[in-house]
Image: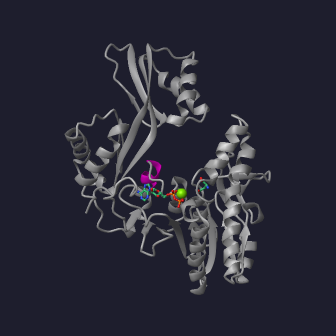
Amino acid sequence: MKIVVLKFGGTSVGTIEKIKKVAKIIYDYKKKKYQVIVVTSAMSGVTNELIKKSREISDNFSEEEYDVLVSSGEQVACSLIAGRLIHQGLKSRSWLAWQIPILTNGLNKNSRIDYINKNKILKYIKEGGVPIITGFQGINNKERITTIGRGGSDASAIMIAKFFKAARCIIYTDVEGVYTTDPNKLKKAKKIKVISYEEMLEMASLGAKVMQPVSIQDARLNRIDIEVKSSFINKPGTLITKRANIINQKIITGISSTLNDAKVSLIGVKDRPGVAASIFKPLSKNLINVDMVVQNISANGKETDLTFTIKSDDLNKTKKIIISNKSISFRKLLFEKGVSKISIIGVGMITTPGVTFRMFQTLADKKINIQVISTSEIKISVLIDKKNTKKALIALHKEFKLDR
Ligand code: ADP
Ligand code: ASP
Ligand code: MG
């Protein structure tokens, strides 16, 4: 019998009614004689609430206790799903990560799944049971509960599919699949039938919340095909797979945008070897992720301007670190919160010249100023004023024929 892994996101288990729908989906797979392993996230909003509580208790809440606390929402969702399946006459039970166990390594809050012991779950499914496993959770070698980063139950599902050699791994969510851009932001967004791991990874890293980036890295490394589909509407979704399986590639596959970026500029920095390292070293030590970086060529050979972007949440911490950094000197420090990064993504751009020009021209025609640019082989990102995000999205979506 074939094993199928079904993952339900917080939006799919957000209410009791939705959990009943989810139970029906699971029931139908079971009736089709699949061996089903279910992975679930917490009911939507629950993890955010728990994080809020931790902040109210302490602005320096213990990271070990954070993981115990914020992973608890998954336990609730698991038992509700299992309870409904039992109500429908199936054999089912909840499995918390430590009971399996799902072993992780790395730091609290951002651990990675390293190993999953298959014995108990395999025995249970052979007996006809439907295991409902907590996503997002693991335990480390000190037997403490860990979590694997926000949105991490996607990665839990992929790793479970890997260890159990599942025939299929289906990510159920609140939209019908992966779209050319967030369908909740742009009505004209179109569902993508098939997308490569590389493009999905870029889209996810650049703001497409539908899949967590780490999960795509894990899927790509282990060559696991992922199906993304709706929990509410029974329609074909999106297949995420290797590039070789895809024909008829468009130049641009999708567009992602972020809203919570901030821009930091250091004006008149003394231009000497090692200055950039001196600026970024303490930021990296404090786990602040620096994204786009531009350094102007120094006109007089003595001074330069350096601009970079970070998450808005890290702005205050970044300010403090830069101001107290004795190893750098500069004339002025500028901060701006209202910026947004728009990225176009597609493997088609490797072989198609002129994509960069088309993107810049499209934005220029809409009088949208580009503040910072960064590129990779399959993506071009620009930083723009946040208030222009929607306008840029609409224009680029049309320019690269994603409306059709
Ligand atoms: P889940 O609760 O299932 O984990 P998420 O909220 O994490 O769901 O992800 C689904 C959401 O991702 C959608 O509601 C949608 O607004 C958003 N999203 C952003 N970009 C995209 C995209 N390119 N395609 C589909 N959904 C996207
Ligand atoms: N419940 C966790 C979160 O909100 C994990 C997930 O949703 O995948 O981040
Ligand atoms: Mg999610």
Tell me where the magenta segment starts and ends, as one range. Answer: 201-206
Give the residue at x 57% y 19%.
325
Q: Is residue 353 depicted above or below 372 in this figure?
A: below
Q: Which residue lies furthest to the right in this view?
A: 142
Give the residue at x 73% y 67%.
95
In front here: 349 or 211?
211
Rendered-image quadrant of the N terminus: bottom right
The rendered magenta stretch, by its main secondary structure, is classed as helix
In front here: 208 or 277?
208
In front here: 89 or 316?
89
Rendered-image quadrant of the C terminus: bottom left
In this picture, residue 135 sits left or right of residue 394: right
Residue 141 part of the magenta-drawn span: no
Q: Is residue 74 depicted above or below 303 in this figure?
A: below
**Residue 371 x/y as whole percent:** 33, 32
Q: Is residue 263 depicted above or below 213 in this figure?
A: above
In front here: 182 or 129?
182
Q: In which quarter of the image is residue 386?
A: top left
